[in-house]
Image: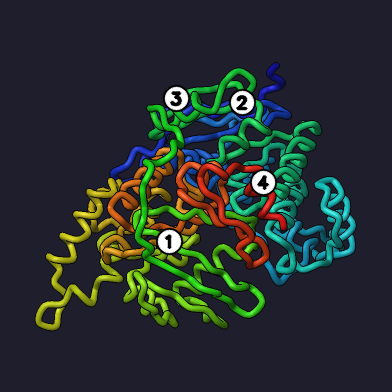
Amino acid sequence: MKHELLLKMEKISKAFPGVQALSEVGLEVYKGEILALVGENGAGKSTLMKILTGVFKKDEGKIIFKGEEIEARDPHHARQLGISMIYQEFSLVPNLDIATNIFLGNEPAKKFGVFDYEKAKTEAERLLQTVGLEISPDVLVGDLTVAQQQIVEIAKALASDSQLIIMDEPTSALSKEEAERLFNIMRKLKEEGISIIFITHRLEEVFSVADRIVVLRDGQRVGELSCEETEINEVIRLMVGRDVRVTPRTDVSAENVILEVRNLSRSTLIKDASFSLKKGEVLGVAGLIGAGRTEIMRVLFGVDPKTSGEVFIEGEKVEIESPTDAVRAGIGLVPEDRKFQGLILNMAVYENISLPSLPFMFANGIIDFEKEYSLAESLVSRLSIRTPSIFQIVNNLSGGNQQKVVLAKWLALKPRVLILDEPTRGIDVGSKAEIHHLIDELAKEGIGIILISSELPEILALSDRILVISKGRITRELTREEADQETIMQYAII
């Protein structure tokens, strides 16, 4: 049953140079509902929300909020109107306390405009109780967990009397338990008549908390669905225009051991990690956030120093004290944070792809640009990277295509071992399926792949064997036949 209409966006269009980002998109939000807004990267979700909150100006259309036509001049004006957006990158100041952050730009004042901190603190306490965060408002934001910061952002939105809160990928850095606590807060806000637009790539979460789903594809609205009356595959089909499923990859009969790690340790973080990887095998690495999965691979790749341990490549012992040593040994690493660890965002696609290969690109002391361009073109084609050209700035690509660029730069070096740390985090279902297919193809070519993922269905579908990590130790090795979600979790919490 639909309630009172809170927001109506009619025929919203927006063009950027060379790109029609939105074409006559409509959106309705009712009072006291949670609306999921989904679509692949580049579908137009963020553009539509940035128009609503005054970051971008629309080219055409109109916005009606609480029965009146509005046009926010900027995000501050949007908050004054009653619309707040919580981005993936929080707008909090780490060295200020919670109370000050909640009222930043909206400070209660005494006479002569002096900040009334006591009033802010009292009101902050009330708001923190409302969102279920039992913590003192004078604690520094920098001392909070990501989940706690997320809740402070919600309190900040409530402090400005927002009737509509937009949450952009709010669970991307949260554990399952933290995400469920956030959903409980969202349900409570809904009961109090506050509306939420929920943007996420995790479609199972949509069905857990949302009432309706609006799907965007290529800048157009392609469907509206009721969570009670539809299934996840129908949402995916609308998002990508075709059926996409996570399917198990092709079986391999890997025999030759390409990598062997013996008793790898780093102070108290990693404790005697020993494992092997076969040629053409996908070795899944599972565990809770903070279990030590990434830490083991950082030591293996030479980013962090080891306390003890040995590494063998095809039976020969190698000393890896830096990433340069790892690359020489034939190991590549696609890090979990592609934007800050995997790419130089203000450089072109071809420059990012060729970066590790530059030592091989010189002719007579200068870079052979034709060779560099040719390498980039071949990998853009092979990985189906969607870009106007190899000269496009990487920051202008979607998340899925950025991830493919990171993969491309390591494939250019023809690695024997490729470590993939959360390779599908924060990308849409279409790009995710393409990367799953690529993992399958690389394994067929004989590359040994170590796959770290927080998504257990992904680990189960793609892995030949699975290592379970807990508190810096490998607690169990499972075959594909032995593995299921319950067994993995059993050994992940030891």
Q: Residue at x 71, y 22 (%)?
A: 4
Query: Distance of mark 2 from mark 1, alpha carbons?
Result: 45 Å
Q: Residue at x 56, y 23 (%)?
A: 231
Query: Distance of mark 3 from mark 4, alpha carbons?
Result: 29 Å
Q: Which residue is mark 4?
A: 79
- Callout 3 secondary element: strand
Q: Whole-percent x and y of residue 429?
A: 45, 39
CA neighbours of label 3 inside 10 A, class few (<14), some (14 to 19), many (20+): some
Please identify, in this view, whether the residue under mark 3 or under mark 1 is nearer the observer.
1
Query: Distance of mark 2 from mark 4, alpha carbons?
Result: 24 Å
Q: Are marks 1 and 4 in contact (CB under 8 Å)?
A: no
Of label 1 and label 4, which has the lower sequence position?
Answer: 4
Instruction: Using the rendered view, name the quadrant where residue 111 is placed.
Output: bottom right
Can the viewer see residue 57 in this picture? Answer: no
Mark 3: which amino acid?
Val
Q: Which residue is mark 1?
A: 277
- Callout 1 secondary element: strand
Q: Whole-percent x and y of residue 221?
A: 45, 27
Q: Which residue is mark 2?
A: 212
Q: Which disc number belongs to residue 222?
A: 3
